[in-house]
Amino acid sequence: MKRIIGLFVFALFVGNTFAQNISQSNVPAVVLNAFQLKFPNADDVKWKLEKGNYRVNYRVNSKEHKLTMDYKGNVLKHIQDLYISEIPKTVLETIRSKVTYFDVNDADRYEDGDKIEYEIKFKIDGKNYYFRISDKGKLLKYRKELKDSEIPLSIISLINDKYGTLDIDRSKYVEESGKIVYIIRGEINDMDHAFWINHKATLLKHTQDLRNTEIPVPVLNAAKAAYSGYEIRDADLIEEGGKIIYILVMKKSKEKVYLTFNPNGKILEVK
């Protein structure tokens, strides 16, 4: 799991390196004119050039906007921070079908080509709720944090019977594309585990941190043979679709390598 986080941070860094800050005087007239005509009241305007497109961060009436335009001044993407009064009724009605009482603390409008979606966030009793809803009121994604008592007993029994007693750290209910998934994270015997289980108590995915002593002998031998002199810094098991893989992070001096193995010790991927 640490590997996944590390790769995400790396990808984020790489993505940001391709975005170059530019002054407004270096923005082509056709792009600048199109922006100023569409948003004449914009202030605190900041421009970036990324892969031939122009990204603009700005404010209108103290609300943040993020805009992406092509070299002709056409709007490609637009993200807008909303006041509660700007949320369409159809969107609010969809939220009320799931939650009766709520107080929105963050609302955003996403425009990507012809597609318009709304992202709404708030808290109830300290628990986070998240909605992604189309401009027509269709529920695209619904996520909420759960109390331990809200996790179905069938799911808790599945985990405890197969893997051991789980000390739950946090859990979520996710509804997307008509599917319901419970995501539960915690510790078993002082090691991190994460479970993705559907509403029928079927395991979809399981990840866990491993002690070096828990790494299967074929995997351990293959790792040592392929990377002699390296030490294991982290080991994870990933179980998904009835298959199991092992991911080892190995380091020697300043060199670090990520290895993916099958249970028999065959190397599937090297990064």
Image (cartoon, rainbow, N blue to C red):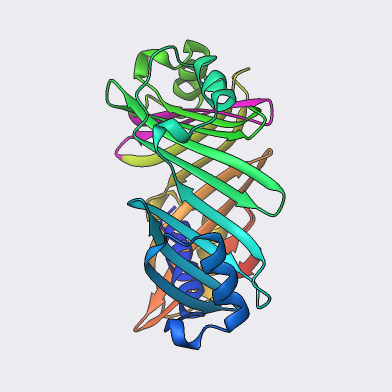
Q: Is residue 80 left or right of residue 52?
A: left
Picture coordinates of residue 234 (x, y %)? 39, 60
Q: Please tell me whether residue 176 belongs to the stretch shown in magenta.
A: yes
Q: Looking at the picture, how far across and down is residue 227, in whole percent?
A: 50, 77
The residue at 48%/65% (across/down) is 7
Please state which of residues 64 and 122 is positioned toward the viewer in this rendering: 64
Residue 253 vertical placement versus 57 (above, below): below
Identify the residue at image location x=50%, y=60%: 39
Q: Residue furthest right?
A: 114
Query: x%, y% of residue 260?
Result: 58, 62
Q: How many marks?
A: 0
Name the residue located 56 percent from the left edge and 27 percent from the top edge.
91
Nearer-the-camera pick, 218 or 72? 72
In percent of the image, x 49 and y 88: which residue is there?
26
Q: Is residue 109 above or below residue 236?
A: above
Any part of residue 87 in sight: yes
In reply to whether residue 79 is colored magenta, the answer given is no
Residue that extends furthest to the bottom in the rendered view of this protein: 26
**Image: 23 above or below 86:** below
Q: Nearer the viewer, residue 149 or 145?
A: 145
Rendered view: 147 above or below 247: above
Q: Position of residue 195 (x, y in %)?
A: 50, 34
Magenta-colored span: 169-190
Residue 259 visible, this angle: no
Q: In the rendered image, which quarter contains the C terminus?
A: bottom right
Q: Quadrant of residue 230?
A: bottom left
Q: Main secondary structure of the magenta part?
A: strand
Q: Nearer the viewer, residue 164 or 185?
A: 185
Q: Is residue 201 found left or right of 44 in the rendered image?
A: right
